[in-house]
Image (cartoon, rainbow, N blue to C red):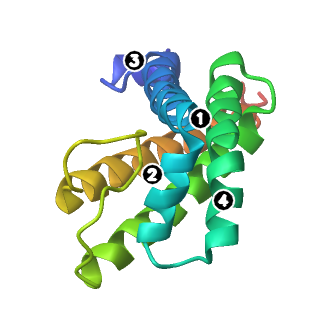
Amino acid sequence: MAAAMIGIPEPKLVEWPLRVALAAVFIYAGMMKALDPQQFAIDVQHYELTSWSFSIVIAIYLPWLEIFAGLALLVGRLYRGALALTGVMTLAFLGAIGSAWWRGLDITCGCFGAEVNRTNYPAHIGLNVAMLGAVAVLGWLEKRSRAPEATATPPE
């Protein structure tokens, strides 16, 4: 209540839209990849960071990990674990995309399943930075909600 009096929005007004948006991105991306794991394995291989065997493992498991992490964000079960997982995945995505851009690879990232156009590196990096920011804000709000009330009534 005190936060609203000084112009800071209530945490739930910030938390829910961020949770829904982040969960939607992960669920959608996971579903699109899960629809065509063979193409996703090829997209992973184009990054030239893993062996073909490991690219297949990524193509099989990563989509489901994204879907379950997104669902956990929405439902609230295993919420802190889902936040940590989405943060780690986003950092890995940033690293892979940044590495491909740095090396001048002309690839389709596979981020959202089969894509028609080549990767727009600045747009993908911007999206991942925004997702990482959402994870950071949600983590801060989660930590803040679990902290002892700082505005407890002082002793008289």
**Mark 4 packing: few (<14 Cα in 10 Å), some, or many (20+)?**
many
Q: In the figure, is residue 118 to the left or right of 46?
A: left
Looking at marks 4 and 3 on the same chain, the residue that comes earlier in the sequence is marked by 3
Camera-nearest residue between 40 and 20: 40
Tell me which amino acid carries mark 4.
Ile
**Mark 3 packing: few (<14 Cα in 10 Å), some, or many (20+)?**
few
Could you say whether the residue bearing mark 3 is in a helix, strand or loop?
A: helix
Q: Are marks 1 and 3 in contact (CB under 8 Å)?
A: no
Q: Nearer the viewer, mark 4 or mark 3?
A: 4
Q: Is residue 105 visible?
A: yes
**Mark 2 packing: few (<14 Cα in 10 Å), some, or many (20+)?**
many
Judging by the rendered image, the residue that carries numbered circle 3 is 4
Where residue 28 sits in the image (x, y, percent)?
48, 27
The residue lying furthest to the front in this view is 38
Looking at marks 3 and 2 on the same chain, the residue that comes earlier in the sequence is marked by 3
Where residue 145 sits in the image (x, y, percent)?
67, 31
Q: In the figure, is residue 74 to the left or right of 21?
A: right
Q: Are marks 3 and 2 in contact (CB under 8 Å)?
A: no
Alpha carbon separation for disc pair 4 and 2: 26 Å
Where residue 122 sits in the image (x, y, percent)?
19, 60
Tell me which amino acid carries mark 2.
Leu
Tell me which amino acid carries mark 1.
Ala
Judging by the rendered image, the residue that carries numbered circle 2 is 132
Judging by the rendered image, the residue that carries numbered circle 4 is 56
Alpha carbon separation for disc pair 4 and 1: 12 Å
On screen, residue 33 above or below 108: above
Tell me which amino acid carries mark 3.
Ala
Q: Is residue 143 visible?
A: no
Camera-nearest residue between 44 and 126: 44
The label shown at residue 34 is 1
